[in-house]
Image (cartoon, rainbow, N blue to C red):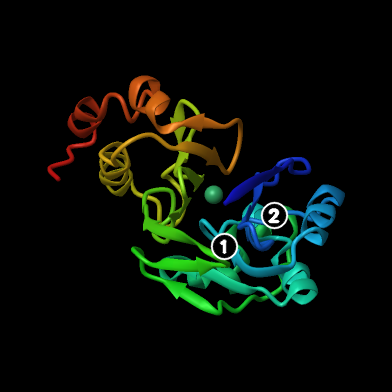
Amino acid sequence: MEVISIKPFGDFSNCYIIKDETGTAAVVDPGCVTDELISELDKCTKVEYILLTHGHYDHIWAVSGLKEKTGAKLVIHRGDEAFLTDENLSHGVKYFPGEQKPLKADILLQGGETLPLGNGEIRVMHTPGHTKGSVVYIAGDTMCSGDTLFCMTVGRTDLEGGSMHDMISTLERLKALKGDYKVLPGHGRDTTLEAERQRNRYMSKIERLKQQYGYKG
Ligand SMILES: [Zn+2]
């Protein structure tokens, strides 16, 4: 399995293509369509899924056009399903009022699924905190972490469906995963899980975070 990073346009999210050796692909968080994305997708034999880490506008804005072009199945956690048709939840209203195209999920996740991709598979981990329906997609030793885990920080928890208590519990579960992973976040630069275990001011200081937010677990 190979994961290709696609540079976003402006403030849109990072986008990734997960591809197995047969050329079957999944696109993670297509916020915007760029020439690079189209040219990489043209090299794939089939685009099986559009995988959303959550429902914010900057991660979903190009889904409609891409679904039409590729026929890929749209995948999101059920906790964020309503974002697909509500520009207030997705925050699309702030930047492009009235322009959000209503989307319909083909697969609603609950977490813990394994999605077959060509000869490989993608694992789904439910990671609420940034939104109720945030997930992380894991392919081999690489995880697409959306707005849950960033290089040296975490996603904000003050938007609709966000919760610092959920985030703390999510960070504990991520931290406890065995081994190391390459972490490809929704914004900013790549990192590794081990680097975040050591240096991320949230993940490395979970006990202090629990005290600060009165988290009992
Ligand atoms: Zn977000």
108 vs 37, nearest the viewer: 37
- The structure residue drawn at horizontal position 38% and vertical position 67%, both measured from the top left corner, is 113
- The structure residue drawn at horizontal position 54% and vertical position 70%, both measured from the top left corner, is 75
Residue furthest to the left: 216
Amino acid type of the residue that numbered disc 2 sits on in the rendered structure: Gly
Which quadrant of the rendered structure holds the C terminus? top left
Which is in the foreground here, disc 2 or disc 1? 1
SS at badge 2: loop
Amino acid type of the residue that numbered disc 1 sits on in the rendered structure: Leu
SS at badge 1: strand
Do labels 2 and 1 touch, CB within 8 Å? Answer: no
x then y, percent, for residue 148: 44, 44
Q: Is residue 143 left or right of residue 127?
A: right
Picture quadrant of residue 171: top left
x then y, percent, for residue 205: 27, 24
Which residue is disc 2 drawn over?
A: 31
